[in-house]
């Protein structure tokens, strides 16, 4: 019989055990080993069988066991200690409080919007890297005391769970999640659930708000599964990245517009400060900008002024250089959705996401483009990705060099307390009272003082944990695939003493899951070498609609099914946080072979590195920046080879030969006591060189100082008096007058051949029409010439003196030292100038000669 309704019966936690409830409901346990130990002690078997879920454990634990524990003085004392520790963690002055005391620009609060959050396996609301990153962002913000409020959706089925059929084809399941069984609290006011409403294609969509407490950070998750909604609308928050474009648009309307409304409700009810900064993590949440404009207009501002007020505090992060990964809608759909989003003028809304630039598609509404237009500050997620994004989006800023495109970069990071193996974390710990000596409480050089054989036996234990996890999962998978009768090989699968390589990531084709299968015989020789074998653990999900990705997985699974391979190469279904945690520490080498430059950052290699695994990677994403021969190996990218098959062949050849000639010999080169001194060196170096760099705490501090503080300062000063009206009026005037702006004439007064060190003088005659010299900067742009007349490596310097040449024309002059030899070129450019522009390129307006 099917149940009609579900009722959750919670245990009575009374007296000394009462704090267990709070400890289970605050997700800080997910990165606090001592709190996890406390829950394990409640019932070790149940702890494992519930998948290490404190709420699940408390819901199922035998009341008699609780009775025993309530009388166990050591346990009761441990509960009290954990409770005191949590309360101290929640109220202490941390890094941000010290930072804010010295930096008056620091924001009161930051709203962090994301379509997915991967905080813990007990809250499966993520599909992959983007969500894990958002989860790590919240956790690191919590550890640093940064006042972030997370905003997302609560998907009743989360992302799919992956299994395989007998043929190795990916199967998807969407188990129903019960919010009452997850660490979530419904937002209520006077005992009544709070709901928000958003207009959806002329109807009203209602949503309730669940709050997850991620350490100090509240995470608001909107849920449309309410009886007041029409059946179809209840399904808006059914699945992450499920359904078609309509479904996704509805989700994004709820996330962006509903998200701001949920945030307002939460701030009002909790009495907490409203955010001054709004961080849009990827384009999905971009409609938050429209809602903020609407709020400003409702308060009496005109559209342009409202845009300025919104932009000043908005930060936009783009996460992919893969064109298909950019979120775009049919303009007609967006038009229909926002037809009466009064008082916003529809044509202005549509213009925000319009691809009205060279190479754009006029039928598309582009969420990334809107993100840039409504965010005064924007970034990519590694240095290389910043560069690629500046080039990719440069048509939005015509007249500017790629290097001037206002997209910066902050390299992603990972949350060490979540991802580092507990045994290793203990070795890196600083003595009490000396935490300030290290980076974020840990001494990343600590392994220098640990004996090599201690490190080596710890690594063997990490591999053994991985082997245990892998065999359990292989057994489950064999049953699902109808192979239960032939599983004795599983007890021989993988070996904790063998060189272990890991490869786990989404099945997106640019990640090239199957590159390692390019020469199967060569791989098999490596796997089955009689004295120096390797073993490989592979995992990853393909998007349910991506048959190409599923075919790649099937190819991998079929290979792993071979009798001569299966004990050394395994594919583990259902890659998620629970699998990932033992996976990274268990690997000696983490493999990454994307098509450069499509891996915007990648974070799995960072998690591996923090656990002492070497990276074997194409120089893409973060590895392009921090690649270091002490920490791994580069696979040179053959991106100049245009034939994709040829490129794969070249890169696969290097992959094999590095494994054969460098990795295997180093791993199996042992001293008399069986320790590979050279490999232990690599473990120590990887942790000390990369450790402090790849931390999510480093990333969050960078966001605070480089983006959140400046955004808060802009928002605050623009919000004062009439500054926003003045700026909007000025921009309107400049845009209107810009067609009149021209460089009429430019010349060098010092000839075409000069000696280095001599003074060069330039004059320019420009027409400014209705604008005056205060509205613009006239720049001399210089650069190298490489045979044609394109300027390379441009630098700009403002003309210093100006005189009125009558009739709206002005004569500019500048002198410059010739500091570089060689063929140099110059030109003259006029750009708008205003104190409130973050960069000269901001308006995308530039006048050049001709
Ligand atoms: C870290 C992680 C990812 C992201 O890895 P990439 O390197 O960005 O591909 C995806 N899924 C899980 C479960 C992870 O832990």
Image (tube, rainbow, N blue to C red):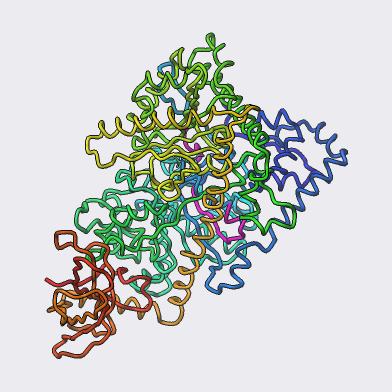
Quarter of the picture holding the N terminus: top right
Is 188 on the left-hand or right-hand side of 312?
right
Q: Is residue 111 above or below residue 207?
A: below
Q: Quadrant of residue 744?
A: bottom left
Asked if the magenta segment contains residue 160, the reply would be: yes
Residue 260, percent across and down?
47, 59
Hey, which quadrant is residue 68 in on the image? top right
Q: Residue at x 59, y 35 (%)?
A: 677
Q: Is residue 412 above or below residue 47?
A: below
Q: Is residue 680 left or right of residue 347?
A: right
Q: Which residues fall within the magenta stretch?
A: 140-161
Horizontal relation, residue 30 to residue 371: left or right: right
Residue at 27% across, 63% down: 793
| Residue 781 belongs to magenta span | no
Against 225, is 812 above or below? below
Relative to 691, say whether 274 is above or below. below
Image location of residue 680, percent across then percent down: 59, 37
């Amino acid at each position: 019989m099917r149940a009609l309704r579900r009722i959750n019966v919670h245990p009575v936690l009374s007296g000394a055990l009462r704090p267990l409830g709070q400890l289970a409901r605050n997700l800080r346990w997910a990165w606090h080993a001592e709190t996890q130990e406390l829950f394990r002690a409640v019932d070790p078997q149940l702890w494992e069988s519930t998948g290490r879920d404190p709420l699940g454990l408390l819901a199922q634990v035998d009341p008699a066991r609780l009775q025993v524990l309530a009388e166990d003085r050591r346990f009761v004392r441990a509960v009290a200690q954990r409770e005191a520790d949590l309360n101290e963690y929640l109220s202490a002055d941390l890094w941000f409080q010290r930072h804010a005391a010295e930096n008056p620009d620091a924001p009161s609060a930051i709203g962090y919007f994301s379509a997915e959050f991967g905080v813990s396996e007990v809250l499966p609301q993520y599909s992959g890297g983007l969500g894990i990153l958002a989860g790590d962002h919240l956790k690191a913000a919590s550890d640093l005391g940064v006042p972030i409020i997370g905003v997302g959706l609560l998907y009743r089925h989360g992302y799919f769970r992956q299994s395989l059929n007998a043929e190795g084809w990916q199967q998807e399941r969407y188990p129903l999640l019960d919010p009452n069984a997850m660490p979530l609290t419904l937002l209520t006011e006077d005992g009544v659930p709070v709901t928000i409403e958003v207009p959806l294609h002329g109807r009203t969509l209602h949503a309730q708000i669940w709050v997850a407490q991620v350490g100090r950070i509240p995470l608001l998750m909107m849920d449309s599964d309410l009886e007041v909604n029409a059946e179809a609308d209840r399904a808006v928050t059914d699945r992450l990245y499920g359904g078609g474009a309509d479904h996704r648009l509805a989700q994004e309307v709820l996330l962006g517009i509903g998200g701001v409304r949920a945030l307002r409700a939460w701030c009002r009810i909790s009495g907490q400060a409203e955010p001054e900064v709004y961080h849009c993590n990827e384009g999905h949440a971009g409609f938050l900008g429209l809602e903020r404009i609407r709020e400003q207009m409702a308060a009496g501002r005109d559209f342009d002024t409202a845009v300025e007020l919104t932009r000043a505090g908005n930060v936009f992060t783009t996460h992919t250089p893969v064109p298909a990964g950019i979120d775009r809608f049919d303009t007609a759909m967006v038009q229909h959705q926002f037809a009466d989003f009064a008082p916003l003028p529809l044509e202005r809304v549509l213009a925000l996401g319009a691809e009205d630039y060279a190479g754009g598609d006029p039928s598309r509404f582009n969420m990334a483009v809107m993100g840039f237009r409504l965010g005064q500050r924007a970034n990519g997620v590694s240095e290389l990705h910043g560069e690629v994004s500046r080039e990719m989006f440069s048509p939005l800023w015509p007249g500017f060099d790629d290097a001037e495109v206002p997209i910066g970069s902050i390299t992603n990071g990972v949350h060490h307390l979540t991802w580092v193996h507990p045994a290793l974390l203990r070795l890196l710990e600083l003595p009490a009272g000396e935490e300030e000596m290290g980076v974020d409480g840990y001494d990343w050089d600590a392994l220098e003082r640990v004996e090599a054989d201690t490190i080596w036996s710890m690594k063997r234990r990490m591999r053994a944990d991985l082997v245990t996890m892998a065999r359990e999962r292989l057994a489950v998978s064999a049953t699902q695939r109808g192979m239960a009768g032939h599983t004795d090989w599983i007890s021989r699968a993988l070996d904790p003493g063998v060189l272990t390589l890991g490869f786990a990531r989404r099945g997106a084709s640019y990640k090239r899951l199957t590159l390692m299968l390019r020469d199967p015989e060569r791989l098999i020789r490596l796997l089955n070498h009689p004295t120096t074998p390797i073993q490989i653990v592979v995992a990853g999900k393909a998007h349910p609609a991506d048959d190409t990705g599923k075919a790649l997985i099937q190819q991998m699974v079929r290979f792993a099914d071979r009798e001569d391979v299966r004990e050394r190469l395994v594919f583990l279904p259902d890659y998620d946080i629970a699998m990932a945690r033992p996976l990274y520490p268990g690997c000696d080498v983490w493999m990454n072979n994307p098509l450069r430059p499509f891996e915007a950052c990648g974070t799995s290699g960072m998690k591996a590195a923090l656990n002492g695994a070497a990276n074997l990677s194409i120089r893409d994403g973060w590895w392009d920046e921090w690649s270091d021969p002490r920490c791994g190996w580069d696979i040179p990218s053959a991106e100049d080879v245009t034939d994709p098959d040829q490129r794969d062949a070249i890169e696969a050849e290097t992959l094999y030969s590095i494994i054969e000639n460098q990795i295997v010999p180093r791993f199996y080169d042992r001293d008399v006591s069986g320790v590979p001194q050279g490999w232990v060196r690599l473990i120590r170096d990887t942790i000390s060189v990369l450790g402090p760099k790849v931390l999510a705490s480093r990333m969050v501090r960078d966001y605070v100082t480089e983006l959140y503080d400046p955004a808060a300062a802009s928002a605050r000063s623009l919000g004062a008096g009439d500054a926003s009206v003045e700026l909007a009026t000025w921009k309107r005037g400049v845009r209107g007058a810009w067609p009149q702006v021209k460089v009429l004439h430019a010349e060098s007064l010092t000839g075409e051949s000069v000696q280095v060190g001599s003074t060069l003088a330039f004059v320019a005659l420009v027409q400014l029409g209705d604008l005056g010299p205060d509205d613009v900067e006239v720049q001399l742009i210089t650069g190298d010439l490489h045979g044609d007349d394109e300027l390379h490596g441009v630098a700009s310097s403002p003309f210093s003196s100006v005189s009125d040449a009558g009739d709206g024309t002005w004569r500019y002059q500048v002198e410059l030292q010739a500091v570089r030899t060689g063929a140099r070129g110059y030109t003259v450019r006029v750009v708008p100038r205003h104190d409130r522009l973050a960069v000269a390129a901001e308006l995308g307006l530039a006048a050049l000669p001709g």
